[in-house]
Structure formats: C-alpha cells, structure tokens
Image: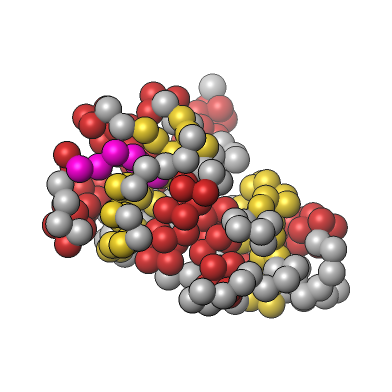
Amino acid sequence: MNAPEVLVVVHTSDAQGVVGVARGDDVFSESLDARGQHARSLLGTLERVLQRAALTMRDVNGIVVTSGPGSFTGIRIGLATAQGLAAARGCGVWTCDSLHAEAEAWLRAEAGVGGARPAGSCIAVVQDARRGEVYAGLYDDGGAKARTVVAPFCDAPARASARLRAAWTTPPYVALGTGAALLEPEPHGFEVVPRPGNGDVVEALVHMARAGACRRVEAHALEPTYLRKSDAEIKRERSS
C-alpha cells in the first residue's frame, strides 16, 4: 500500500535532522537543531512546518520515518516520535533506511526538474560510524526510484570500499555522506559528491513512500537499523 497525500516526514538519523510535511505536491520542511538536540526541537519544529502548510495534525493521515543507520539517539527519537504521532492519529507508518533516502534524493537532483535519471547512475552512501568504521550502502537508478544494490552494512573503510566496488558494474565510483572521504582511494578512487539538502531528502522520502519504495509497518513494529552494538551495550558486556 502506497502512502496517502498528507504526510509527516521524520528523518533524524543524522546529527542535523529534518522534519517535513507533504500536502499533495507541496512539500514543506525545516532542519532541526544542528547540535543534534532532536528531542528538544522536533515537535516544535514540526508544529511550525504544519502551520506553514496550513495544516494541523488532524489533517495528517500518514507518517514517513527513516530507521537508520546513523546516530543511535537520533534514530530512537525519530522512531519514538513516529510511533507517538501514529498512535495519536491512528494513521499508517512507512519506513526505509536513511542511506536509501539520501541516494534517492541525489538521483532526483541529478535528473533535474522534469528530467530523466542519468542512465546507469549509481551512488554509494557512506556515513562515518566512528570507531574506525563506516555505514555504507549502494543504490542505482532502478527506473522511477532508487534500487538497493548493496543493503546497508557496517565495516572498516577499506573493506567497505572493496565490497562496494565488487558490486559496481562500471566506474565512475561516486559516493556521498560524512564517511565518503574515508573510503579506500586506490585503485579507482571514489569521487565524493555533495550531500543532498535536507529539503531534498524530505521530498525524496515523500516520493518513495508514494511510489512503494518504503515499507508499510504497524507503529508498534517499528525497528531501528543500528547495524552494530552501541557503546553502552559493549561496555555492559565488558563489565559482565
């Protein structure tokens, strides 16, 4: 089932998250606190965006939320907010991984207004996972929406580079994200391209939800995409 016309979008996997509202073809968005204080700023920001769209939460009939990978705290806040909003409204929830959303935003920007996607376009989305690792995924144009070639994984940059290149049919190798510059440069270095703007990511998520590229889930069944254990879990295991 594809998403309805009036949607709230929550993307808090990054240090600077974004919320948005879609009303038909009109999409409104606003970035959150750049210091990552999503818990404090999310609902207030959403209220402002709803006002700009001349809507209230009573008008909303769907929630789109990214599940990660990314900031563990940001992911938890985003999913909890989506669950709360969906429970209050009794509306549907759609979700996808955050790397997929970034890839879709880049591919749409490459196509331009009213344009076709570049033939054979492929993009690696790579986020710095710290501890000497990156989160990475590989996506191609897939027609009307980004298609997952390599699902998100967590690994050291050199091994991530090899895994991404092994699945890539032909160069150029293009990557975006906070971890893109960490990829192994040789052989066939990755060209690092600018990340899409937050507003572009919101528009991409709206498009994906309506095009059937997001999963419809029950709010209580939302699960984070962490890909690895948190620092707190590792500390508990070491102390036990």
Q: Is residue 1 left or right of residue 118?
A: left
Q: Is residue 137 left or right of residue 101?
A: right
- Residue 50 found in image quarter: bottom left
x and y percent of residue 105 in the render? 51, 64
Measuring 76% from the left and 58% from the top, which residue is drawn there? Answer: 164
Q: Is residue 202 left or right of residue 19?
A: right
| Residue 1 visible (yes or no) | yes
Measuring 42% from the left and 26% from the top, which residue is drawn there? Answer: 218
x and y percent of residue 171 in the render? 81, 73
Whether 153 is drawn above or below 111: the answer is above
x and y percent of residue 224 in the render? 48, 36
Front-most of residues 157 and 137:
137
| Residue 139 visible (yes or no) | no
Specify start and end residues of the magenta stretch as a single range. 59-64
Front-most of residues 131 and 214:
214
Measuring 25% from the left and 42% from the top, which residue is drawn there? Answer: 60
Task: Judge whether residue 74 is colored magenta.
Answer: no
Front-most of residues 169 and 135:
169
